[in-house]
């Protein structure tokens, strides 16, 4: 029988521990594919965050490092500056990147470090059990905002692409989602651009991905992807926020 | 003869680090060590090394984590409050068994404290400093010459044992000018062997993973016990000290860094007065030179510990001497620096004489 679909060589032969309907697996597969199709697996160094995707260091079939919570962009900087030939990518969640690691992501962007950031925004702390994230929507329930996020007391969410696009440094910023096949294809295209920018020495490229967390949200997988389409993508509009290649033409 | 220059201690560190083949510096300004990043920015630029002025000490130590994991010699420098910020990163680096060099030019604390010399970060340096069961190799220079030579030693020890290394200086050593001999040939970083654990892309080999966690039941416990064996080897092999006039001493002053220079002068005053006094200067603070102190305590009745703190190293002296000797103390916390006459008076008092 002819095999028409399989695990890409960019992923190890390990069972993913993610919950049913979680978006991490989709993004992992995209990265695993691109490591092979862009022929960068053998010079890639990936950074696993703290959070559900801490196990990314077991899943991506390339050299990996697992640094402290939020410090991925700083560790990436250390690796990339030491070995400019390596393709360095930092995979981070919203707690990692937009709460504890806010300083590191802003300054890596401001320096236009030649690294690739994959930012999973699921508006919740998944690994620790569904607490309020810096990206939790106003009114959205979490285990530390059981009545819904009260902006009077808990402030507003952080829109990372909008925030970083205020800087002169970053080369490429795009927000995607993995709620529909069409958006998944767009996500793959954006991540490919983010890697190609690094290969071409263009600089800091980040793809923010709105991603389902059915467990943290208390929804079924189908309800969760519909919630991204109907609610989350309305608050976090999809699109390209910065692409300096346009200025070069 | 090797080149000799009159230079600041902080500048001697920079030349020592570069001569040791290190081409990666990341750091954040803080007094009294600013001369290190300032000169480093010029020197690294000139020789094609990496210099990054970071957004915080947290970023700096994590850049070191990345550079070290990539197999390169990497260092940062800071002073006490900045070193506190780095503790999370140092814990991860120790947990991932990576070699880095951290230089702490200690200032008065706690809190923002002041910018005067101090030794009050001894506990932090010698007890791990961050969370978890770990230790950092800690060297205590007491001259510009040491500040030039210790970076090479620190990198060698850090790489031999795959462990972070600290150089514990203070504001006085950093700001003092002394003649420094460039006592060894600079190391070409290209001549350093590739690390068999470095992240560099998995071409023609199995992929490598650098991490400090293991969630499988029992595995982290095993890992910690394995690391303890490494610490035991370091304690056995790497205790370093300098002993002056200790052989016939009725009293031995124990002091490191700046305090060992001050105490050395006090010991000379005592000898002139006919008192049998010696000086033991720990060079490694971790591993602490326990063995020599244990031996000395069989015959030396009095030890005087001199520190620029409320008394931290004194605990290690007490542990090493196992209650056999009398332990006296003279301390100056919060940026105070003892003078030789001050220490001499303490020596006289400890020996039952004096005023």
Image (tube, coloured by chain):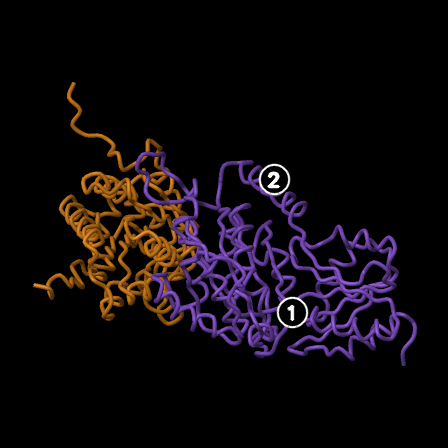
Nearer to the camera, B191 or A79 = B191
**B24 left or right of A20?**
right
Percent position of residue B150, x then y: 56, 60
Which chain corresponds to the colour purple?
B
Looking at the rendered structure, which numbered label has been put on residue B225?
2
Determine the residue located farthest toward the front in the rendered image: B1
Q: Determine which quarter of the picture holds residue A204.
A: bottom left
* Residue A129, visible in the rendered structure: no
Percent position of residue B209, x then y: 41, 41
| Vertical position of residue B115 compared to residue A137: above or below | below
> Local crowd at mark 2 within 10 Å, few (<14), some, or many (≥20)?
few
Q: Determine which quarter of the picture holds residue A98.
A: bottom left
| Vertical position of residue B270 compared to residue A64: above or below | below
| Callouts 1 and 2 on one subunit | yes
Q: Residue at x 80, y 63 (%)?
A: B245
Instruction: Give whichever of discs 1 and 2 has the lower sequence position.
Output: 1
Percent position of residue A214, x then y: 31, 46
Q: Chain of mark 1?
A: B
Q: Residue at x 75, y 50 (%)?
A: B291
Which chain corresponds to the colour orange?
A
Looking at the rendered structure, which numbered label has been put on residue A48?
none
Q: Chain of mark 2?
A: B
Q: Quadrant of the C terminus of chain A?
A: bottom left
Q: Give the alpha-carbon distance from disc 1 to disc 2, as whole Å.
A: 31 Å
Q: Residue at x 26, y 63 (%)?
A: A112
Q: Which residue is mark 1?
A: B119
Q: Circle 2 — which element? A: helix
Q: Determine which quarter of the picture holds residue B310.
A: bottom right
Q: Residue at x 28, y 55 (%)?
A: A115
């Amino acid at each position: 029988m002819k095999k028409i679909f399989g695990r890409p060589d960019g992923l190890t032969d390990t069972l993913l521990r993610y919950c049913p309907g979680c978006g991490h697996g989709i993004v992992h597969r995209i990265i695993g594919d691109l490591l092979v199709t862009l022929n960068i697996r053998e010079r890639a160094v990936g950074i696993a965050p703290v959070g559900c995707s801490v196990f990314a260091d077991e899943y991506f079939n390339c050299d990996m490092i697992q640094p402290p919570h939020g410090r991925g962009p700083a560790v990436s900087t250390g690796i990339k500056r030491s070995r400019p030939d390596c393709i360095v990518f930092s995979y981070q969640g919203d707690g990692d990147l937009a709460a504890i690691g806010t300083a590191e992501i802003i300054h890596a962007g401001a320096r236009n470090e030649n690294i690739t950031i994959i930012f999973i925004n699921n508006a919740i702390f998944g690994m620790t059990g569904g607490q309020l994230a810096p990206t939790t929507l106003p009114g959205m329930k979490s285990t530390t905002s059981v009545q819904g996020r009260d902006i009077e007391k808990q402030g507003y969410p952080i829109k990372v692409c909008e925030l970083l696009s205020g800087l002169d440094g970053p080369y490429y910023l795009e927000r995607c989602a993995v709620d529909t096949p069409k958006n998944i294809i767009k996500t793959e295209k954006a991540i490919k651009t983010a890697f190609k920018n690094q290969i071409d020495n263009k600089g800091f490229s980040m793809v923010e991905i709105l991603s389902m967390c059915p467990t943290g949200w208390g929804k079924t997988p189908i309800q969760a992807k519909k919630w991204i389409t109907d609610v989350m993508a309305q608050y976090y509009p999809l699109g390209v926020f910065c692409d300096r290649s346009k200025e070069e033409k | 003869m090797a080149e000799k220059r009159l230079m600041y201690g902080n500048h001697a560190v920079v030349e020592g680090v570069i001569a040791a083949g290190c081409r990666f510096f990341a750091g954040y300004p803080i007094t009294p060590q600013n001369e290190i990043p300032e000169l480093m920015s010029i020197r690294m630029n000139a020789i094609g090394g990496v210099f990054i002025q970071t957004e915080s000490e947290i970023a700096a130590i994590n850049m070191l984590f990345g550079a070290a994991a990539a197999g390169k010699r990497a260092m940062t420098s800071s002073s006490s409050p900045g070193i506190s910020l780095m503790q999370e990163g140092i814990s991860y680096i120790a947990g991932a068994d990576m070699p880095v060099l951290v230089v702490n030019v200690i200032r008065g604390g706690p809190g923002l404290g002041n910018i005067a010399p101090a030794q009050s970060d001894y506990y932090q340096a010698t007890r791990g400093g961050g969370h978890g069961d770990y230790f950092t190799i800690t060297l205590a220079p007491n001259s510009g010459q040491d500040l030039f030579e210790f970076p090479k030693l620190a990198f060698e020890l850090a790489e031999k044992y795959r462990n972070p290394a600290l150089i514990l200086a203070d504001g006085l050593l950093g700001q003092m000018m002394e003649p420094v001999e460039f006592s060894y040939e600079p190391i070409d970083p290209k001549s350093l062997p590739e690390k068999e654990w470095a992240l560099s892309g998995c071409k023609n080999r199995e992929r490598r993973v650098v991490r400090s966690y293991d969630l499988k039941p029992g595995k982290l416990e095993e890992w910690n016990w394995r690391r303890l064996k490494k610490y035991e080897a370091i304690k056995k092999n790497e205790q370093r000290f300098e002993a002056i006039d200790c052989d016939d001493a009725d009293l031995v002053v124990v002091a490191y860094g700046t305090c060992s220079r001050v105490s050395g002068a006090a010991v000379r005053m005592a000898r002139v007065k006919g008192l049998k006094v010696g000086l033991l200067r720990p060079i490694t603070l971790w591993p602490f030179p326990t063995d020599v102190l244990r031996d000395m305590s069989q015959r030396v009745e009095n030890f005087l510990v001199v520190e620029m703190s409320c008394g931290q190293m004194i605990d290690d002296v007490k542990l090493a001497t196992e209650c056999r000797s009398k332990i006296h103390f003279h301390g100056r916390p919060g940026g105070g620096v003892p003078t030789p006459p001050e220490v001499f008076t303490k020596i006289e008092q400890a020996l039952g004489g004096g005023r």
